[in-house]
Amino acid sequence: MTDWIYPSGSATDGPWMISLGAHDSALPVPGWEHTGLKVAQLAPAGSVELAAAAEERIVIPLTGDSFTVTLDSGEVFELTGRPSVFHGPADVLYTGINTGLRISSATGGRVALALAPAKAGYPTRLIRAEQTPVELRGAGNCSRQVHNFGTPAALEADRFIVCEVITPAGNWSSYPPHKHDEEKDGETSLEEIYYFETQLARDMPAPVSTDPIGYARVYASDERPIDVNTEVRTGDVVLVPYGWHGPAMAAPGYDLYYLNVMAGPGRVREWLISDDPHHGWVRQTWDEQQLDPRLPFGA
């Protein structure tokens, strides 16, 4: 394990199967300041709690029928979940800052909390699955599906940008390789978290025992060293502090999901990127290709 790769089970903290970057995370990541992620697997009738802190949060059901979120203000929200992250969007809840919460589920399931240290307060907002902007991005074997519930166009927030991406088996996403590690014209400085899940692709013949995998790539864009080229499976996390990143590759036979959490020190909350100049030309080829017919998931 490096400071940037956290295989499933390597970032646990009490009831949390993943706890990175939160105000209470027991596992420090040197130099990591602007984003955080917590993931819990709840047993039936189980719950987790998180105290109020100067961080904004989005509750994201990953797997499970339903979740109840109770805020320390006394407000209660019922979130409809999904059978898996490959079944389209779920309801999500933005809680703002300085808000304690409790997440519970009668039937159990897996739930994520995306977060970022923040100062400005914005209203609590429940975004239903059917309200989530679903974008089908790219073409050909670069086709993927993006759920933009936490992007600037969809959500008022202080610091973070949050979305999730589904990449069909054999396709590449986060491609062409790009970066957002400088504050300059046309680019914003953003840390980024990738939380992954994988599955055997739909209608794919396979033996009883399978090992769904994907791959993730991060490499240096300047003098700061970084070199990530790793297999990923359900529960794995890759951190991108800087540098070119992409592709995120869905291996043939296996679909790939990732939750992205981004935030940075800049003045503007906006996702502005620079393509690796060696590979940016690939975007031009999409105009002549069709969208992958396997999309959308959850239709």
Image (cartoon, rainbow, N blue to C red):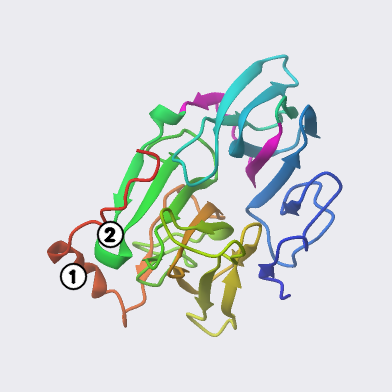
Residue range corresponding to the magenta coloring: 108-128
Q: Is residue 90 visible?
A: yes
For label 2, the residue is: 138
| Amino acid on which disc 2 is placed | Gly
Q: Is residue 163 above or below residue 211?
A: above
Q: Position of residue 45 (x, y in %)?
A: 78, 27
Q: Is residue 38 magenta?
A: no
Seen as rendered, the residue at the extreme left is 288
Q: Residues within 10 Å of mark 1 (few under 14, many from 20)?
A: few
Q: Secondary structure at mark 1?
A: helix
Q: Position of residue 52 (x, y in %)?
A: 76, 32
- Decide which of 171, 160 is in the foreground and name it: 171
Dividing the picture into quadrants, the one containing residue 20 is bottom right
Q: What residue lies at 72% left-to-right and 24% top-to-bottom?
A: 106
Which part of the image, by quadrant, shows the N terminus? bottom right
Q: Is residue 234 above or below residue 232?
A: above
Mark closer to the chain start, 2 or 1:
2
**Left of 287 or right of it: where is 89?**
right
Task: State if disc 1 and disc 2 touch (CB < 8 Å).
Answer: no
**Left of 279 or right of it: where is 233?**
right
For label 1, the residue is: 285
